[in-house]
């Protein structure tokens, strides 16, 4: 007991605690952006896919078409990041990498090469390749936004910034894939019901088209959310009140 006869001393708990960003947070933030700008994001994404297809179809040599596709993919990452930050979504960001074509293509190619090399490890190669894909998740954003950084430095920086967060990035993507697979599995089972099964087959076809249009956008926004919340903001979630002592 205290000598002055007052109440026993209790150490004060910290008023606020910062929560680390969670996979659920990334999905929720990405969904919010997708609800606000679905058509603009889909339009630019469609343009990117068409240009990649044209580069593959008319490129005389893979050494020409592959770098173009890599730069466009980096540009699409910039589009998703602009959308996530509340900026205007247009095709300007898609072509941002062409002003430094060889540097951006080299950085993206260097990343893809290392993922491929890790995948060559016998037996466990695919597992290591997936892990490295998430280790290098921030490379497109880094090389697009930093004109001075080299490909090797971009990879090292991404590896350092994703340390401790790779599992959450993977879980966010996995949850989206699992939900889509679950919906299609249920609809597939319902389509086996006599008489009404045809209706569920039609619904399943429409849902699959919807997923094909929307899921790539959602995954792109989740990746952009990961970069913004982890790389830029340090992976610290919103502050929440702690219960008082």
Image: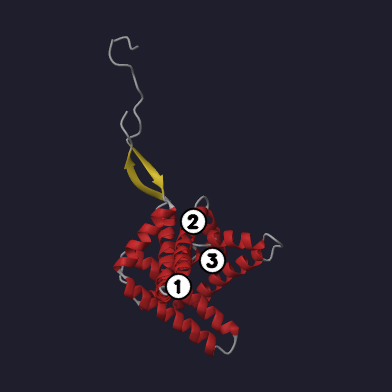
Rendered location of residue 140, percent (x, y): 48, 67
Rendered location of residue 216, percent (x, y): 44, 70
Does dot 2 land on a helix, a strand or a loop? Answer: helix
Does dot 3 land on a helix, a strand or a loop? Answer: loop
The residue lying toward the viewer, choosing from 106 and 191, is: 191
Rendered location of residue 88, percent (x, y): 30, 71
| Cα separation between marks 1 and 2 | 37 Å
| Cα separation between marks 3 and 1 | 61 Å
Which mark identifies residue 150? 3
- Per the image, the residue denoted by label 2 is 171
**Which quadrant: the C terminus?**
top left
* Circle 2 Cα neighbour tier, 10 Å, few/some/many (<14 / 14–19 / ≥20): some
Q: Tell me which label, 3 or 1, sits earlier in the chain.
A: 3
Q: Tell me which label, 2 or 3, sits earlier in the chain.
A: 3
63 relative position to 50: left or right? right
Q: Tell me which label, 1 or 2, sits earlier in the chain.
A: 2
- Per the image, the residue denoted by label 1 is 194
The residue lying toward the viewer, choosing from 26 and 3, is: 26
**Which quadrant: the N terminus?**
top left
Q: Which residue: 29% across, 16% down?
A: 7
Q: Which residue: 34% across, 76% down?
A: 90
Rendered location of residue 167, percent (x, y): 52, 53
* Circle 1 Cα neighbour tier, 10 Å, few/some/many (<14 / 14–19 / ≥20): few
Q: Is residue 231 above or below residue 52?
A: above
| Cα separation between marks 2 and 3 | 29 Å
| Nearest-to-viewer mark from 1 and 2 | 1
The residue lying toward the viewer, choosing from 233 and 181, is: 181
| Nearest-to-viewer mark from 2 and 3 | 2
């Amino acid at each position: 007991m205290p000598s002055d006869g007052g109440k026993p001393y209790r150490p004060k708990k910290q008023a606020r605690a910062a929560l680390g960003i969670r996979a659920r947070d990334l999905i929720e933030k990405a969904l919010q952006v997708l609800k606000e700008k679905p058509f603009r994001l889909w339009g630019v994404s469609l343009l990117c896919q068409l240009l990649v297809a044209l580069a593959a179809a008319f490129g005389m040599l893979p050494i020409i078409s592959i770098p173009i596709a890599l730069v466009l993919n980096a540009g699409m990452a910039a589009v998703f990041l602009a959308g996530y930050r509340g900026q205007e979504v247009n095709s300007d960001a898609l072509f941002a990498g062409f002003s430094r074509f060889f540097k951006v293509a080299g950085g993206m190619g260097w990343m893809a090469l290392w993922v491929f090399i890790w995948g060559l490890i016998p037996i466990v190669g695919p597992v290591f390749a997936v892990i490295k894909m998430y280790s290098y998740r921030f490379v497109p954003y880094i090389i697009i936004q930093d004109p001075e950084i080299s490909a090797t430095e971009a990879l090292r920086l991404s590896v350092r910034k994703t340390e401790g967060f790779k599992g959450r990035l993977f879980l966010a993507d996995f949850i989206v894939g699992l939900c889509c697979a679950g919906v299609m599995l249920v609809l597939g089972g319902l389509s086996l019901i006599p008489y009404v099964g045809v209706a569920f087959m039609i619904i399943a076809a429409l849902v699959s088209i919807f997923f094909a249009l929307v899921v790539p956008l959602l995954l792109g926004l989740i990746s952009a959310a990961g970069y913004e919340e982890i790389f830029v903001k340090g992976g610290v979630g919103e502050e929440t009140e702690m219960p008082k002592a």
